[in-house]
């Protein structure tokens, strides 16, 4: 319990600090805040007043931060500086795409990454060599390059999958998101497969497995109950880190496949210098990143009680 | 570039004659590792002298020469603006290595400085620096780089420095754990008793002992930095056209690829993949598996 409380407090502290960074980033920009927010666009005095009010530029800095933060908590994230759309509404329409993409990719990482690692770690021989070679190469493939190659082969060349869009309805969405999810998860699958294989090889040489063999337990039981289960502990951490990484890694793939997710919105907003939207998305990504990391830590304590004792002490 | 060339040699503990040194490096890296060093060496060479070897001007194209296949004149064909792809790859090697070099250099310097300060003073200083790093850990590295670009505008230097800030916590944490062990050894105590000041002990005695870790980490970070910076250029937030850069070339080729001319994206992507794979292999051979689990994003 103490561990849980400490972990929550730590996350809270980190989130407050990082929200300050996201908020204050505005004042690091060269020139005055108004100049930076307007970016040389010619705007009417009313719009300028609206911007001043949105960022409460007439108040001292702590008040501005407080106004912004309480706004975020009540769902009011301001308006886009370009289109005057409500940022909250804009985001709400984009989040489902990103979430389904990340969930799809996470499933691929868990199934393919751990699966390939188990195959390589237990079978040995050619299968092991192929997995090792492929994972060495897979780590080096940037997601956006994987995206383009997959698109060129399966969409343009073979015509099996659509080139862009996120699709309507469940089945159509899975079909549309298959290539993006594959591209997004490829480097992580490579890393996870490699870590799983190493863990399994190490675990199968450990004393408790040797004893299980000596006692004549069936090979199946030894493999699943003793080797795989214990070797999944280090793997869980790595899988968690990679799934948390998907939150922010998704925007490159979204951009490549022109999906209408939050990531693509972030990139477009940076290109069009719409800082209000950039700030909101950055904050959401940091929160999501922190929460996923927290969940992984909690999951870890469920799997391995020793962690709870060690860290909570 | 110096970091990469020196990495295999510096990892040898004992100074040896040049011929032995090569043999020892081979023993340490294996034949595959030596091939990787060769690949990296070739890329570095392209980055340094590539622009003199390039048969064409990498930024000047010709409307009549668009999308040519490979031929004796254009070794790898031409892109959508009629520019020679081979020349652009050679020129792109420079920008594609320069950015990661800034990232790795800045990360190594700042990361070591933070880690060694924390280790030397320990106690409250260590705890405080730990909290600062925790906050940096909260930002996915590409997100931090994108924030910086949003504020300071796109460009190689902005993106590289932002990425370095995002890499610092990882590198500082590794160096800290190694330096912590050194700090507790008797020779440090002995130097302290002799009245040598902390800064001198840290720089003259502790730093050389964690040097291998710093170099290994840098080699591995270099690979990640190539990928991350290429991603930024791909998003249009890093290097700006018409400059040649591998990440930018992949993005430039996206439209041609959908029209059935995959050459430009394909070759530029392969350059990145091969270079990064070679760097990763060398790094792993030098430093063991410690870094294999690091998050890529």
Image (cartoon, coloured by chain):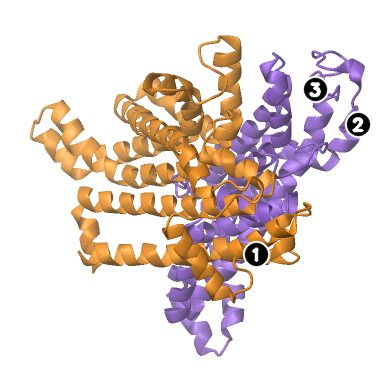
Q: Residue A247 at what x, y percent from top left? A: 46, 43
**Label 2 marks which chain's residue?**
B
Q: Which mark is residue A165?
A: none
At horizontal 43% and vertical 45% (from top left) the residue drawn is B293
Left or right: residue A77 compared with residue B146: left
Which chain is tinted orange?
Answer: A
**In this picture, is B204 found above or below B72?**
below
- Chain letter for purple, please: B
How far is mark 3 from mark 2, CA to CA?
13 Å
Residue A136 position, x and y percent, is 50, 33
Disc 3 element: loop
Question: What residue did someone put label 3 on?
Answer: B79
Of labels 1 and 2, the one closer to you: 1
Q: Which mark is residue B57?
A: 2
Secondary structure category for the residue under label 2? loop
Depicted A138 relative to depicted B136: above or below: above
Q: Which residue is mark 1?
A: A52
Q: Position of residue B135 (x, y in %)?
A: 48, 63
How busy is the neighbourhood of tag 3: few (under 14 within 10 Å), some, or many (20 plus)?
A: many
> Can residue B23 be seen at all in this image of the molecule?
no
Instruction: Tell me which label, 3 or 2, sits earlier in the chain.
Output: 2
């Amino acid at each position: 319990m103490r561990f849980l409380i400490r972990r929550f407090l730590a996350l809270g502290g980190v989130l407050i600090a990082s929200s300050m960074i996201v908020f204050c980033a505005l004042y690091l920009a060269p020139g005055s805040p108004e100049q930076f927010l307007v970016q040389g666009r010619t705007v009417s005095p009313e719009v300028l007043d609206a911007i001043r009010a949105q960022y409460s530029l007439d108040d001292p800095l702590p008040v501005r931060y407080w106004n912004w933060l309480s706004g975020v908590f009540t769902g009011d994230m301001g308006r886009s500086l370009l289109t005057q759309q409500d940022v909250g509404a804009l985001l709400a329409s984009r989040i489902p795409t990103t979430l389904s993409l990340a969930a799809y990719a996470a499933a691929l990482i868990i199934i393919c990454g751990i699966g390939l690692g188990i195959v390589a770690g237990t079978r040995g021989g050619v299968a092991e060599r192929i997995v090792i070679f492929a994972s060495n190469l897979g780590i080096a493939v940037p997601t956006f390059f994987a995206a383009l190659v997959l698109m060129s082969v399966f969409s343009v060349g073979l015509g099996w999958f659509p080139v862009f869009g996120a699709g309507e309805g469940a089945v159509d969405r899975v079909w549309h998101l298959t290539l993006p999810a594959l591209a997004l998860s490829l480097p992580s699958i490579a890393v996870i497969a490699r870590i799983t294989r190493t863990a399994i090889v190490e675990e199968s040489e450990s004393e408790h497995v040797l004893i299980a063999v000596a006692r004549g337990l069936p090979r199946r039981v030894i493999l699943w109950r003793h080797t795989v289960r214990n070797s999944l502990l280090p793997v869980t951490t790595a899988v968690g880190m990679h799934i948390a990484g998907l939150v922010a890694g998704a925007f490159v793939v979204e951009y490549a496949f022109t999906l209408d997710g939050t990531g693509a919105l972030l990139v477009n907003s940076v290109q069009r210098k719409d800082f209000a939207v950039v700030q909101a998305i950055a904050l959401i990504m940091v929160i999501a990143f922190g929460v996923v990391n927290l969940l992984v830590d909690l999951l870890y304590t469920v799997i391995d009680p020793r962690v709870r004792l060690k860290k909570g002490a | 570039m110096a970091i990469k060339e020196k990495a295999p040699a510096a990892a040898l503990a004992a100074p040896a004659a040049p011929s032995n040194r090569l043999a020892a490096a081979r023993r340490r890296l294996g034949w595959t590792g030596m091939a990787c060093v060769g690949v990296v060496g070739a890329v570095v060479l392209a980055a340094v002298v590539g622009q003199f070897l390039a048969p064409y001007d990498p930024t000047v194209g010709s409307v009549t020469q668009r999308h040519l296949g490979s031929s004796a004149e254009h070794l790898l064909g031409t892109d959508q603006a009629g520019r020679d792809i081979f020349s652009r790859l050679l020129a792109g090697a420079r920008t594609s290595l320069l950015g990661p070099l800034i990232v790795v250099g800045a990360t190594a310097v700042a990361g070591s400085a933070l880690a060694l300060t924390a280790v030397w003073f320990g106690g409250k200083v260590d705890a405080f620096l730990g909290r600062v790093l925790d906050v940096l850990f909260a930002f996915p590295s590409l997100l931090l780089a994108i924030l910086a670009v949003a504020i300071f505008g796109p460009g190689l230097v902005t993106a590289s420095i932002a990425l370095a800030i995002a890499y610092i916590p990882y590198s500082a944490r590794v160096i800290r754990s190694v330096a912590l062990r050194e700090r507790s050894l008797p020779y440090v105590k002995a130097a302290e008793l002799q009245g040598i000041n902390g800064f001198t002990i840290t720089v003259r005695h502790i730093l050389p002992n964690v040097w291998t870790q710093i170099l290994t980490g840098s080699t591995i970070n270099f690979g990640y930095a190539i990928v991350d910076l290429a991603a930024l250029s791909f998003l249009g937030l890093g290097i700006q056209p018409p400059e040649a850069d591998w990440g930018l070339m992949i993005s430039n080729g996206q439209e041609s690829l959908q029209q059935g001319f995959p050459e430009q994206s394909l070759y530029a992507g392969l350059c990145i993949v091969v270079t990064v794979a070679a760097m990763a292999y060398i790094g792993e051979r030098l430093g063991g598996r410690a870094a294999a689990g690091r998050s890529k994003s």
